[in-house]
Image (cartoon, rainbow, N blue to C red):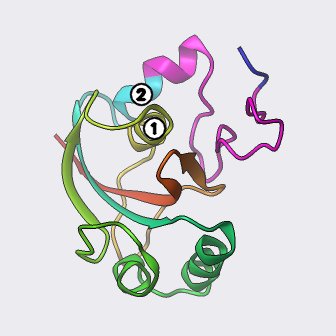
């Protein structure tokens, strides 16, 4: 097992470290929190921004930090095939790749007006993600 904040590539690009109150994975405690900070719920309504290049996702992150709404930033920057302003709909445990799922089920629920999103970024085989959870079932 890699130390927290480290990736197998040695570049720290896995997104293992967590910010904005998100538990870092790699411990039993973090795995138990995978159901979400509000308890229960094995399905979450998710929005995200996906970019293949690190520089592009950092531009998107800056827009968010300056107050632009996640759905607007997603429309401009996200490179996912859905291109529905970042809306991925409901996801269940096991329906997505590991690092993405770890963060999705650890994030608190928030809205577009006051989003709580992953910071640092989440790195998967698809690229870099900024993730926000809108609801939990």
Label 2 SS: helix
Q: Please name the residue that numbered disc 2 is placed on.
A: 34
Label 1 SS: loop
Identify the magenta region. Answer: 4-32
- Tell me residue 94's x, y (percent): 28, 27
- Tell me residue 132's x, y (percent): 40, 59
Which label's residue is closer to the chain start, 2 or 1? 2
Asked whether, in this view, residue 92 is left or right of residue 56, the answer is left
As for residue 67 lying within the magenta part, the answer is no
What is the tally of numbered marks visible in this picture?
2
Q: Which mark is residue 106?
A: 1
Residue sitting at the far right: 10
Tags 2 and 1 touching, CB below 8 Å: yes
68 or 49, nearer to the observer: 49
Residue at (34% x, 79% y) in the render: 71
Q: Quadrant of residue 62?
A: bottom right
- Tell me residue 14's x, y (percent): 65, 41
- Tell me residue 25's x, y (percent): 59, 27
Q: Which mark is residue 35?
A: none
């Amino acid at each position: 097992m890699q130390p927290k904040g480290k990736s197998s590539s040695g570049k720290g690009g896995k997104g293992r470290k967590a910010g904005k109150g998100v538990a870092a994975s790699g411990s039993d405690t973090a795995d138990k929190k995978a159901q979400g900070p509000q308890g229960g719920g094995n399905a979450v309504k998710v929005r995200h921004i996906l970019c293949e290049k690190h520089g592009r996702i950092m531009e998107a992150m800056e827009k968010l930090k300056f107050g632009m709404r996640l759905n607007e930033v997603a429309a401009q920057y996200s490179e996912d095939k859905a291109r529905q302003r970042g809306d991925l709909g409901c996801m269940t445990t096991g329906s997505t790749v590991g690092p993405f799922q770890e963060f999705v089920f650890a994030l608190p629920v928030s809205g577009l007006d006051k989003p709580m999103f992953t910071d640092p970024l989440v790195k998967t085989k698809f690229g870099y993600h900024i993730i926000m959870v809108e609801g939990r079932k």
